[in-house]
Amino acid sequence: MLLALALFADRLHKHVQIEVLGWRGGEIVPVTGFFDYVLVWNTGVSYGLFGDLPLWLLGLVIAAATIALAIWWWRSTQTLVRAGLALCIGGALSNAVDRLLYGAVADFFHFHWQAYSFYIFNIADTAITFGVLLLVLDILGIGRDRPAPDAA
Protein backbone atom coordinates (compact mmCIF):
# COMPACT_ATOMS: atom_id res chain seq x y z
CA MET A 1 0.00 0.00 0.00
CA LEU A 2 2.78 2.47 0.91
CA LEU A 3 4.69 1.52 -2.24
CA ALA A 4 1.63 2.28 -4.39
CA LEU A 5 0.94 5.52 -2.50
CA ALA A 6 4.49 6.81 -2.99
CA LEU A 7 4.53 5.81 -6.66
CA PHE A 8 1.04 7.17 -7.44
CA ALA A 9 1.44 10.50 -5.60
CA ASP A 10 4.72 11.28 -7.36
CA ARG A 11 3.50 10.17 -10.80
CA LEU A 12 0.31 12.22 -10.46
CA HIS A 13 2.21 15.33 -9.37
CA LYS A 14 4.70 15.06 -12.23
CA HIS A 15 1.96 14.30 -14.76
CA VAL A 16 0.06 17.45 -13.80
CA GLN A 17 3.14 19.70 -13.86
CA ILE A 18 4.76 18.34 -17.02
CA GLU A 19 1.98 16.90 -19.19
CA VAL A 20 -1.02 19.03 -18.15
CA LEU A 21 0.58 22.38 -17.29
CA GLY A 22 3.40 21.99 -19.80
CA TRP A 23 6.38 22.77 -17.57
CA ARG A 24 9.64 21.96 -19.37
CA GLY A 25 12.33 23.09 -16.92
CA GLY A 26 13.56 26.35 -15.51
CA GLU A 27 10.18 27.49 -14.21
CA ILE A 28 10.39 29.23 -10.85
CA VAL A 29 7.47 30.18 -8.63
CA PRO A 30 8.68 31.96 -5.47
CA VAL A 31 6.52 30.83 -2.55
CA THR A 32 8.36 32.24 0.47
CA GLY A 33 11.72 33.84 1.12
CA PHE A 34 13.20 30.37 1.64
CA PHE A 35 11.12 28.12 -0.66
CA ASP A 36 10.54 28.10 -4.43
CA TYR A 37 8.44 25.76 -6.52
CA VAL A 38 10.57 24.96 -9.58
CA LEU A 39 11.26 22.36 -12.24
CA VAL A 40 14.84 21.16 -12.42
CA TRP A 41 15.95 18.07 -14.34
CA ASN A 42 18.37 15.86 -12.40
CA THR A 43 20.40 13.58 -14.68
CA GLY A 44 22.23 11.93 -11.80
CA VAL A 45 21.22 10.24 -8.59
CA SER A 46 21.02 12.15 -5.29
CA TYR A 47 22.53 15.62 -5.53
CA GLY A 48 23.24 14.94 -9.23
CA LEU A 49 25.85 12.26 -8.42
CA PHE A 50 26.78 10.00 -11.32
CA GLY A 51 25.14 12.36 -13.81
CA ASP A 52 27.88 11.56 -16.32
CA LEU A 53 27.05 7.85 -16.44
CA PRO A 54 25.30 6.62 -19.59
CA LEU A 55 21.54 6.31 -19.03
CA TRP A 56 21.58 2.54 -19.60
CA LEU A 57 24.28 2.03 -16.94
CA LEU A 58 22.50 4.27 -14.45
CA GLY A 59 19.31 2.33 -15.17
CA LEU A 60 21.11 -0.95 -14.53
CA VAL A 61 22.42 0.27 -11.17
CA ILE A 62 18.97 1.54 -10.18
CA ALA A 63 17.33 -1.74 -11.25
CA ALA A 64 19.82 -3.79 -9.24
CA ALA A 65 19.29 -1.63 -6.14
CA THR A 66 15.51 -1.81 -6.48
CA ILE A 67 15.60 -5.60 -6.86
CA ALA A 68 17.81 -5.88 -3.78
CA LEU A 69 15.36 -3.73 -1.78
CA ALA A 70 12.43 -5.82 -3.03
CA ILE A 71 14.14 -9.04 -1.91
CA TRP A 72 14.84 -7.48 1.51
CA TRP A 73 11.17 -6.41 1.72
CA TRP A 74 9.97 -9.91 0.76
CA ARG A 75 12.14 -11.60 3.40
CA SER A 76 11.50 -9.15 6.23
CA THR A 77 8.94 -9.83 8.93
CA GLN A 78 9.34 -6.47 10.71
CA THR A 79 6.51 -4.03 10.01
CA LEU A 80 8.73 -0.96 10.26
CA VAL A 81 11.29 -2.42 7.86
CA ARG A 82 8.64 -3.43 5.34
CA ALA A 83 7.01 0.02 5.52
CA GLY A 84 10.36 1.78 5.09
CA LEU A 85 11.36 -0.41 2.18
CA ALA A 86 7.97 0.02 0.51
CA LEU A 87 8.37 3.81 0.60
CA CYS A 88 11.93 3.54 -0.76
CA ILE A 89 10.90 1.19 -3.57
CA GLY A 90 7.86 3.29 -4.54
CA GLY A 91 9.96 6.45 -4.71
CA ALA A 92 12.75 4.72 -6.61
CA LEU A 93 10.32 3.26 -9.15
CA SER A 94 8.73 6.64 -9.80
CA ASN A 95 12.10 8.29 -10.32
CA ALA A 96 13.04 5.38 -12.62
CA VAL A 97 9.91 6.08 -14.69
CA ASP A 98 11.13 9.68 -15.06
CA ARG A 99 14.43 8.43 -16.43
CA LEU A 100 12.60 6.24 -18.95
CA LEU A 101 10.18 8.97 -20.01
CA TYR A 102 12.41 12.05 -19.87
CA GLY A 103 16.01 10.88 -19.48
CA ALA A 104 16.22 12.68 -16.10
CA VAL A 105 14.30 13.04 -12.85
CA ALA A 106 11.95 15.99 -12.38
CA ASP A 107 12.56 17.82 -9.08
CA PHE A 108 10.26 20.59 -7.83
CA PHE A 109 10.79 21.65 -4.21
CA HIS A 110 13.67 24.03 -3.59
CA PHE A 111 14.55 25.24 -0.11
CA HIS A 112 17.19 27.95 0.18
CA TRP A 113 18.46 30.54 2.61
CA GLN A 114 20.14 33.70 1.38
CA ALA A 115 22.87 32.51 -1.01
CA TYR A 116 22.77 28.88 0.21
CA SER A 117 20.72 26.43 -1.86
CA PHE A 118 19.55 23.21 -0.25
CA TYR A 119 18.57 20.02 -1.97
CA ILE A 120 15.93 20.28 -4.72
CA PHE A 121 13.63 17.26 -4.48
CA ASN A 122 10.29 15.71 -5.41
CA ILE A 123 7.58 13.61 -3.75
CA ALA A 124 9.44 10.38 -4.58
CA ASP A 125 12.55 11.68 -2.82
CA THR A 126 10.40 12.53 0.20
CA ALA A 127 9.03 8.97 0.26
CA ILE A 128 12.57 7.57 0.05
CA THR A 129 13.71 9.85 2.90
CA PHE A 130 10.82 8.80 5.15
CA GLY A 131 11.49 5.17 4.22
CA VAL A 132 15.11 5.48 5.28
CA LEU A 133 14.03 7.15 8.53
CA LEU A 134 11.79 4.16 9.27
CA LEU A 135 14.73 1.83 8.64
CA VAL A 136 16.88 3.88 11.02
CA LEU A 137 14.14 3.65 13.67
CA ASP A 138 14.19 -0.12 13.23
CA ILE A 139 17.98 -0.20 13.63
CA LEU A 140 17.51 1.74 16.88
CA GLY A 141 15.07 -0.95 18.04
CA ILE A 142 11.95 1.18 17.86
CA GLY A 143 8.91 -0.81 16.78
CA ARG A 144 10.48 -4.20 17.44
CA ASP A 145 8.97 -6.77 19.75
CA ARG A 146 10.87 -6.84 23.01
CA PRO A 147 11.88 -10.25 24.31
CA ALA A 148 10.05 -11.36 27.43
CA PRO A 149 12.16 -10.97 30.58
CA ASP A 150 13.62 -14.21 31.89
CA ALA A 151 11.76 -15.57 34.88
CA ALA A 152 14.27 -16.05 37.66
Image: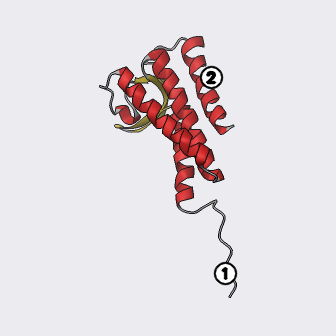
* Residue at screen point 57% across, 12% down: 19
Number of other residues with Cα within 10 Å of mark 1, as a class: few under 14, some 14 to 19, many 20 or more: few
* Residue at screen point 59% across, 47% down: 75
Which residue bears the numbered disc 1? 150
What residue type is disc 1 on? Asp
Q: In front here: 25 or 106?
A: 106
Q: Is residue 5 left or right of residue 139?
A: right
* Residue at screen point 66% across, 51% down: 79
Q: Judging from the image, what secondary structure is the residue with disc 2 in?
A: helix
Number of other residues with Cα within 10 Å of mark 2, as a class: few under 14, some 14 to 19, many 20 or more: few
For the N terminus, give its image quadrant.
top right
Q: In front here: 73 or 117?
A: 73
Q: Judging from the image, what secondary structure is the residue with disc 1 in?
A: loop
Q: Residue 134 bears which disc, if any?
A: none
Q: Indicate the position of residue 54 as horizontal and vertical percent values.
A: 33, 22
- Name above or below for residue 3 compared with residue 94: below
Q: Indicate the position of residue 20 as horizontal and vertical percent values.
A: 60, 12
Q: Is residue 131 left or right of residue 114?
A: right
Q: Earlier in the sequence, mark 1 or mark 2?
A: 2
- Name above or below for residue 23 compared with residue 81: above
What residue type is disc 2 on? Leu
Q: In front here: 71 or 25?
A: 71
Which residue bears the numbered disc 2? 12
